[in-house]
Image (cartoon, rainbow, N blue to C red):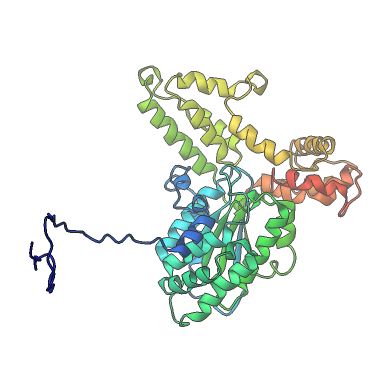
Amino acid sequence: MAANTALFPDASHFTIQGSQFTTTQTNNIQSLAVDSALEILHRHQALEATHTSKTAASAPKCKPGTRTKAIKDITSWATDRGADPSSSAESVLWLRGPAGAGKTCIMREVARICRQEGVLAGDYFFSTRVPGLDDEAPFVATIVSHLITVTPALDHPVRETIRSSSTIFKQSLELQVEKLIFNQLASIPPQTPAPRVLVVDGFDECRDPRQRAHLLRILHSLVASPYSFRVVIACRPEYDIRSAFDQPPLKSIAKILYLEAYQVSGEIYEYLSDEFTRIRETHPAKDSIPSEWPGQAMLHALTDKASGIFAYPSTVIKYIDNHRRHPVDLLEHILRPSSTLSSGEPFAELDALYKIILNPPDTDMPLMKRLLHVVMEITQLPTGYKSNSGVEELVQTRGPDSNDPITRLTHQILSPPLLDKFLSLRGGNNGNDSLRPAFANLSL
């Protein structure tokens, strides 16, 4: 057959015989290649360490109207646009408090407000309960991932740096900070808006004290840089962390907020009242629950038992809010003497929490028990108690002038030098210091 010019355009001088042709149409499909730099970055970051993660979405939050003073104090400091950007004075804020006091709830709210205000450069929530969040390795990658999102001018140069150095996240954190933060900020116009607040929570849950010391040096390099970062950090006052904040370079640039200084008894009472009301109104056994249950006296008793620790009332409510059991019976169960409670209920979570606190590595448990016995006895002493032990002049400070007797006792009576003297221990940096981190977390 003659050549079909529809099939062979511009063809001439050739013949095809005894053939059939079927025409088809082919569409070119071009797949979008995944950006290798982003893939590397995302592989090394810890998304679950941020306040917008799935873990955070299902985690406890501050009840509306609670912890407002602490949150306001922190966010006012963090968002202070009048602060001298060339000065590192008070460029670190440490929120310190005991376990279960609600630090993480507060810090998630602080991160949320800082993000809304456009000042959040990055956040990281350490945790021993989420795999991988008790280690320093993903820290810089996680911060950088957020920083390029809120500072678009950094996106392209950071990606280019990662492409040209694909193993950067296997190198030191110092080098990561230098190449991915400092060098990139230096490459954009100085007037480019760039958030500068870093929020770090659960710092004590980075398990290795050497890693904590390392991260404190990293954070100091950020606040001491020409780029005026500010850091809000929250954790329990572990011995190594207290020591770091009590000496240069952090001592001169850190502002310390003591969470126990914020009076929260009223907020705990309101929380319990609202939650018991909800249980009375929604529980399947609501028709058999007395309308006045549990009563003001019981609410005050539970508030006193909490001692300012939000973990206690939240654990109580979680235990009582069981649709398979009658809440009145469960509350009575909680209030029985502890010796009658079987293992695992109802304070299993608190037991696990304080087991971790009271059993750090290398703790001298017999000495720990002696210390706890002394603490229990001292807190029962009446005002003006006299003795020959060296305690009397401090015990006399107990009285109506203090708004927070627990805090005052902790800092005045239960100090390590006095305990050394009282128990005839050799003071200073000796073997006894191995138990002080655990002991301090009970009250500092």
Q: Position of residue 115 (x, y in %)?
A: 43, 61
**How far across and how far down the image is residue 133, in percent?**
58, 49
* 145 sits to left or right of 285: right
Q: Is residue 135 left or right of residue 274?
A: right
User: Residue drawn at (51%, 21%), measured in percent from left and top?
Assistant: 330
Which residue is rendered at x = 64% and y = 21% of the image?
337
Choose between 418 and 436: the one closer to the eye. Answer: 436
Q: Is residue 323 visible?
A: yes
| Quadrant housing residue 150 | bottom left
Camera-nearest residue between 130 and 402: 130
Task: Locate residue 253: give its quadrant.
Answer: bottom right
**Location of residue 380 in the rendering, given as x and y in whole percent from the top left corner:** 74, 35
Figure check: 81 above or below 135: below
* 176 horizontally vs 328: left or right: right
Q: How many marks?
A: 0
The quadrant of the picture occupied by the N terminus is bottom left
User: Is 261 situated left or right of 18 in this image?
Assistant: right
Find residue 214 and report its image quarter.
Answer: bottom right
Query: In the figure, 152 relative to 382: above or below?
Result: below
Q: Is 403 located above or below residue 289 in the figure?
A: below
| Residue 119 in view, yes or no | no
> Residue 181 location, x and y as percent?
54, 71
Q: Please tell me which residue is depicted at 67% across the width and 45% down the height of the picture.
A: 405
